[in-house]
Amino acid sequence: MDTKASASGRPPGRVRGPAESAVRIVFVYAVVAGVWIWASGIVSRELTVNANLLTLVDIAKGSLFVVVTSALLFIRIRGDFSRLQASADRLRESEQRFRRVIDVSPVPMTMSDADGNITLVNAAYVKEIGYTREDIPTIAELWPKAYPDPEYRRQVIRTWEVATEVSRQTGEAFDPIEARIRCKDGSDRTMLMTSAPLGPASSEQVVVFFDITERKRAEEAVQKSNERLERVLKSVVALIGKVVETRDPYTQGHEEGVARISRLIAGEMGLPEDQVDGIEVAGLVHDVGKLSVPSEILTKPGAISDTEYQLIKEHSQRGHDILEGIDFDWPVAEIVLQHHERMDGSGYPAGLAGDDISLAARILMVADVIEAMGAHRPYRPALGLDIAMAEITGHPEKYDPQVAAACIRLHEAGRITV
Ligand SMILES: [Fe+2]
């Protein structure tokens, strides 16, 4: 398809080039000359009875030939030149319209040629970024103005050159590149930029800019706010853990220790970072239900009765009930509810087994046992990590094998401390 003719709004037409026109003219000339020489020779010999007149007749028919062919050539050449002129006018008009469209576009754009000359800077570019074509006649002069930091400039140029090379080969615009541009007024703006060659035969390329400065600022503000909220949440959660520990001084540091070990195991198992965070939070508050257990039972030295043990066992459900109303990003209440369940169904409160127990709770239960057995308690010395690990590996029916395997790897690497 003739893209230039289409761009002008006219239907694509057949326009002869100069070479084709020249061939046609020469062809017409040769045919007319041949026919003339052949036909006029026969006619003049037939009609000329006096041989003395033959020279005059030859001069007359030669002159007539020149007049006729000159007239034909004039008509032919004038027609072709008119068509070529009209074609050039249409092309110029089409280019002017194209440049006008670019110039009035609300999107900042520039155009440059193969030699790196900037051939057009539209009004939106001047308005948003500030540089006119006089400020940046070439791309080489644009780089240091738009990217004053030499290292950042090198980085942008490298990325830009790779992208434009791909674009040149494919003829398509490349995926937008994000860059921080220094505007003429000295402010910095974050832009998405893309570029494409104007056509297969064109050495010019058009560059389109999209200002995302405000969007980036809003995203950064939301990110900072989220980080602050997360810090506040973790502080509050850690505080809840500390409150629990004040009622049960025998387990001081237990919540933090379980949270730390749970995080290590979840990370070792390759869980997504967000899930690892959730398991850590659940670890920090997993015994919050002990707030509802009388402190005399929690701090009672020596053996406890069956009734007292039943009361302590209720802490999983109580913890769940307390946490259920908090809108965590993770199922913290459910993890806490299940942290004393066991894979063989021998745990409490529901006696869940296997896959009915969430993976997070399977991690937490192992971390809980390791911390409880491995750490020192006021009423007994630490049993040690080896004994704690033996409890896990010695009861494959109770603990998730993959969690146990991750735990063994961490222990062997010396990464678990209590
Ligand atoms: Fe517990």
Image (cartoon, rainbow, N blue to C red):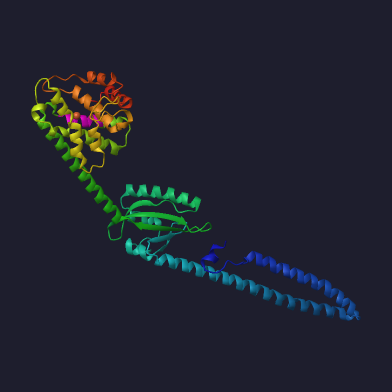
Magenta residues, as a range?
253-262
Pick whichever, 323 or 267, lies toward us: 323
Give the x, y percent position of residue 286.
Answer: 20, 33
Instruction: Examine the image and state in which quarter residue 416 appears.
Output: top left
Please identify the residue farthest to the right as the structure is shown. Answer: 49
Which residue ends up furthest to the front in the rendered image? Answer: 307
Q: Position of residue 258 (x, y in %)?
A: 21, 29
The answer to whether 20 is drawn above or below residue 82 in the figure is above
Q: Residue at x 20, y 45 (%)?
A: 229
Q: Residue at x 41, y 54 (%)?
A: 194
In the rendered view, tell whether residue 317 sits above or below residue 83: above
Magenta segment, prevailing SS (helix, strand or loop): helix
Q: Is residue 20 left or right of residue 403?
A: right
Res 38 quadrant in image: bottom right
Q: In the image, is residue 10 part of the stretch drawn in magenta?
A: no
For the point 10% across and 27% down, which residue is it? 297
Question: In which quadrant of the rendered image does the C terminus lie?
Answer: top left
166 or 406: nearer the viewer: 406
Question: In this rendering, does residue 417 appear at all?
Answer: no
Q: Is residue 68 left or right of residue 105?
A: right
In which quadrant is the N terminus drawn? bottom right
Residue 167: image location, x then y, percent:
47, 51
Count the numbered circles shown.
0
Asked if 258 appears above or below 37 in the picture, the reply is above
Residue 145 coordinates in the image, percent (x, y): 33, 56
Task: Identify whether 255 is placed above or below 202.
Answer: above
Q: Nearer the viewer, residue 141 or 222?
A: 222
- The picture quadrant for ligand 1 comes to top left
Question: Is residue 9 something that shows in the picture?
Answer: yes
